[in-house]
Amino acid sequence: MAGPGYRDTTRVAAGPSALWAEILLGNRREVLAGLQELRTGLQGLETSLEKGDAAGLAKFLEEAAQIRRKLPGS
């Protein structure tokens, strides 16, 4: 089961894979940097969950909310 938010965030997956492969390769450096940043953030989230660190979780969520507020149209 998935709602419309999931459908929206996976929209790219419905596109032509060859086109998206070209786009990813053409932006390889930026995509790799973004993936590293994502990995680091997820590792921090995982660590906070494993330790039951409510303050760490709150910090992660607040940082995510700040990023969200900076998006156009937010």
Image (cartoon, rainbow, N blue to C red):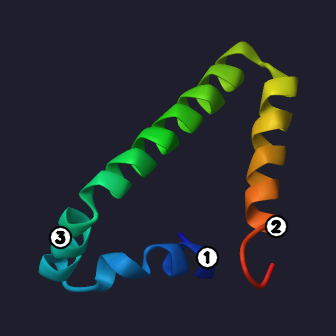
Tag in front: 1 or 2: 2
**Hey, which quadrant is residue 47 in on the image?**
top right
Residue on which disc 1 sits: 5
Residue 3 visible in the current orientation? no
Residue on which disc 3 sits: 21
**Hey, which quadrant is residue 60 in on the image?**
top right
How far separated are the C-alphas under marks 2 and 3?
30 Å
**Quadrant placement of the C terminus:** bottom right
Q: Nearer the viewer, residue 54 or 62?
A: 62
x, y percentage for residue 45?
64, 32
Residue on which disc 2 sits: 69
Q: In the rendered view, tell whether residue 52 sits above or below residue 42.
A: above
Mark 3 nearby-residue class (10 Å; few <14, some 14–19, many ≥20): few
Cβ atoms at labels 1 and 3 below 8 Å apart: no
Mark 2 residue element: helix
Mark 1 and mark 3 lie on one chain; the one further toward the N terminus is 1
Give the residue furthest to the left.
18
Cβ atoms at labels 2 and 3 below 8 Å apart: no
Which residue type does callout 2 highlight?
Arg
Which residue type does callout 3 highlight?
Ala
Which residue is rendered at x = 28% and y = 64% of the image? 27
Which residue is rendered at x = 18% and y = 82% of the image? 19
x, y percentage for residue 72?
73, 81
Mark 2 and mark 3 lie on one chain; the one further toward the N terminus is 3
Which residue is rendered at x = 54% and y = 28% of the image? 43
How far separated are the C-alphas under marks 1 and 2?
18 Å
Mark 2 nearby-residue class (10 Å; few <14, some 14–19, many ≥20): few
Which residue type does callout 1 highlight?
Gly
